[in-house]
Amino acid sequence: MPQVKTAKSTPVGGEKPRAKRPAKIDPAVVREIFARFQKQNAEPKGELEHVNVFTLLVAVVLSAQATDVGVNKATRALFAIADTPEKMVALGEERVRGHIKTIGLFRAKAKNVVALSEKLLRDFGGETPRTREALETLPGVGRKTANVVMSMGFGESTIAVDTHLFRLANRIPLARGETPLEVEMGLMKIIPPEYLFHAHHWLILHGRYVCKARKPECARCVISDLCRSPEKTVG
């Protein structure tokens, strides 16, 4: 007797069914992941060199599409002579460009650094604001930059989603998302409060040095047995 082929159901509008996302990660697994990160590195630190909150802000603005190592090389001499908004404005855009010319997009970044310094003097009394809303009014400052400054400069528990963290959140997966904001919101919901302050540094450093984009080094990953990525190279 010949088999009867059944027609596959098609959603309204003729769209193909979307692939199912993996089930949400178990909260106990999330806790274990961050407990291991904490055991490995109890006090993770950001790698951008700075001398105060203002220079931190400038360094993060300069780090867009650039490495922390490259930014640090460029800013050591800059921050030695311009560590306040007043000094940065006095230095001027041309001289700022001269200091950061080894960094990608240095012309636009120099313009933003001087402009944000002027705005700090004009609108904030020369002080770096503490809120995300105020920080995002500054030239060259987006949500990620604001989150880094709030965390490293003011001790706030924020998640700054860079390319490393975005990759890890989707790869492990911890919190899937198609945009940095989706990933940020997802992580804020699942990370236990006691791990939240250091979470973004743990993830960024793990993505930078272990769970690399092209070739994750799973053999030395402290959470490899908890990871569900199909890219894993070890069990």
Image: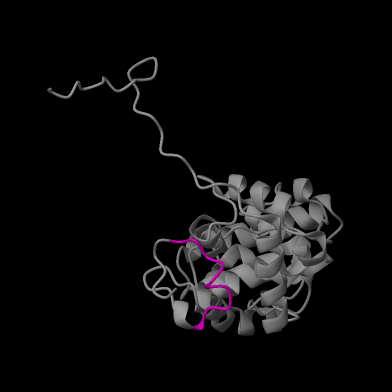
111 vs 172, nearest the viewer:
172
Relative to 24, say whether 72 is above or below.
below
Q: Residue at x 71, y 46 (%)?
A: 137
On the rendered image, what quadrant is the N terminus found in? top left
Q: Residue at x 51, y 47 (%)?
A: 22
User: Could you tell me residue 74's position as x and y percent?
Assistant: 55, 80
184 vs 118, nearest the viewer:
184
Q: Is residue 212 inside the magenta stretch? A: no
- Is 125 displayed left or right of 62 in the figure? right
- Is 51 displayed left or right of 75 in the figure? right
Residue furthest to the top: 12
Residue furthest to the front: 1
**Number of numbered discs overlaid on the protein picture:** 0
* Residue 229 visible, this orientation: yes
- Is 17 displayed left or right of 40 in the figure? left
User: Could you tell me residue 212's position as x and y percent?
Assistant: 45, 72
Relative to 209, say whether 33 is above or below.
above
Indicate the quadrant where residue 92 lies: bottom right
Figure coloring: one colour
On the rendered image, what quadrant is the C terminus found in? bottom left
Relative to 105, say whether 5 is above or below.
above
Indicate the quadrant where residue 159 lies: bottom right
User: Could you tell me residue 208's position as x and y percent?
Assistant: 52, 74
Magenta segment, prevailing SS (helix, strand or loop): loop
Residue furthest to the right: 125
What residue range appears in magenta?
220-229
153 vs 25, nearest the viewer:
25
Q: Is residue 221 inside the magenta stretch? A: yes
Residue furthest to the left: 2
- Is 219 displayed left or right of 82 in the figure? left
User: Could you tell me residue 169's position as x and y percent?
Assistant: 56, 58
Q: Residue at x 76, y 50 (%)?
A: 132
